[in-house]
């Protein structure tokens, strides 16, 4: 069964550094999403992407964040200058029909 | 502000019994409703989706939706220890023309006691 994959599984970085989180959505899906979950808190929507552009973004997704689909398979989330409060689990999700979203295993980001 | 509320628990249920998980949402235009299961340290795993009022059954799981009361629930029959996890309620508002993010509740921690 096709799955969303994410790399790396863990990332440790210094405050102020740039990080790129990578996702490979399910191959026939058209809608892509990033979510984050700070430890012990709820899953929060960051951004959605469709037809090579951002469809919706939350208040969390400020100018420090960007997304890109650099080729036909990858979907990336870049954090330009990480802050301590960016430490979280970041989940990529994809959907074929704009309804049912399937989540990847996540990238655990730790900012020191 | 879209809000999804769940009792955080823990909800403790004996093995073999029915576990009942509840969720309320604030946005009346919410159109799609989902239950995800999340084991500790893992990603959300889709269990059920429901779009119209009434019940929807899938194996041991039944989702119930009441849009007038802005209420959605999940019943797990014949609960197993492997059902012990946090259950996340999520809602989606489809605005057309693009992809809309899910709004999640904080989740209910379910413990199935052997």
Image: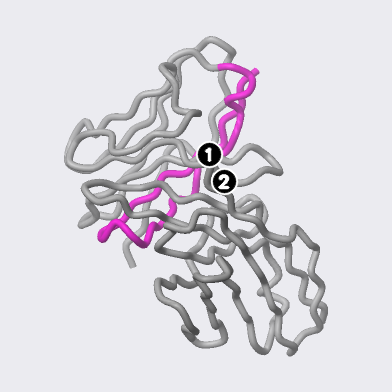
- Residue A75 pos. (x, y %): 30, 37
Relative placement, left or right, of A51 versus A107 is left
The tag on residue A5 is: none
Q: Residue at x 61, y 62 (%)?
A: B24
Q: Position of residue B69 (x, y in %)?
A: 58, 70
Residue A62 on image: x %, y %: 44, 21
Residue at 45 percent across and 34 percent down: it is A58
- Examine the rendered structure and indicate whether residue B62 appears above or below residue A49: below
> Vertically, is A73 above or below B26?
above
In reply to whether residue B7 is colored magenta, the answer given is: no
Q: Residues within 10 Å of mark 1 (few under 14, many from 20)?
A: many
Please report, as a chain letter, where disc 1 is located.
A
State how the image is colored: one colour
Q: Quadrant of the C terminus of chain A?
A: top right
Looking at the image, do the residues carrying marks 2 and 1 touch, with CB atoms under 8 Å apart? yes
Indicate whether B30 appears above or below B59: above
The residue pinned by badge 2 equals: A43
Which residue is denoted by mark 1 in the rendering?
A: A36
What is the quadrant of the N terminus of chain A in the image?
A: bottom left
Q: Nearer the viewer, residue B65 or A53?
A: B65
Q: Residues within 10 Å of mark 2 (few under 14, many from 20)?
A: many
What SS does tag 2 mark? loop
Q: Chain of mark 2?
A: A
Relative to the observer, which residue lies in front, B65 or A84?
B65
Q: Quarter of the image holding residue A89?
A: top right
Whole-number angstrom distance, CA of label 2 to CA of label 1: 6 Å
Instruction: Return the x and y of residue A20 as percentages of the image width and height.
Output: 40, 26
Q: What's the residue at 38%, 57% (across, down)?
A: A101
- Point out the stretch of residues depicted in magenta: A83-112
């Amino acid at each position: 069964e096709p799955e969303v994959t994410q790399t790396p599984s863990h990332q440790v970085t210094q405050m102020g550094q740039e990080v790129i989180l990578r996702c490979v959505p399910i191959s026939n899906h058209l809608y892509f999403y990033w979510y984050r979950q700070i430890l012990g808190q709820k899953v929060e929507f960051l951004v959605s992407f469709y037809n090579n552009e951002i469809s919706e973004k939350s208040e969390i997704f400020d100018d420090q964040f960007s997304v890109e689909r650099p080729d036909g398979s990858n979907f990336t989330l870049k954090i330009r200058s990480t802050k301590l409060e960016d430490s979280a689990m970041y989940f990529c999700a994809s959907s074929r029909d704009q309804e049912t979203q399937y989540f990847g295993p996540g990238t655990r980001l730790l900012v020191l | 502000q879209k809000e999804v509320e769940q009792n955080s628990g823990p909800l403790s249920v004996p093995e073999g019994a029915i576990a009942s998980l509840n969720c309320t949402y604030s946005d009346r235009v919410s159109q799609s409703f989902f239950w995800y299961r999340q084991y500790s340290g893992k990603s959300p795993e889709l269990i059920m989706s429901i779009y119209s009022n009434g019940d929807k059954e899938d194996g041991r799981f039944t989702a119930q939706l009441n849009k007038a009361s802005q209420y959605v629930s999940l019943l797990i029959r014949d609960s197993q220890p492997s059902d012990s996890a946090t259950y996340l309620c999520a809602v989606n508002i489809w605005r057309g023309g693009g992809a809309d993010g899910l709004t999640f509740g904080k989740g209910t921690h379910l413990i199935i006691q052997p």
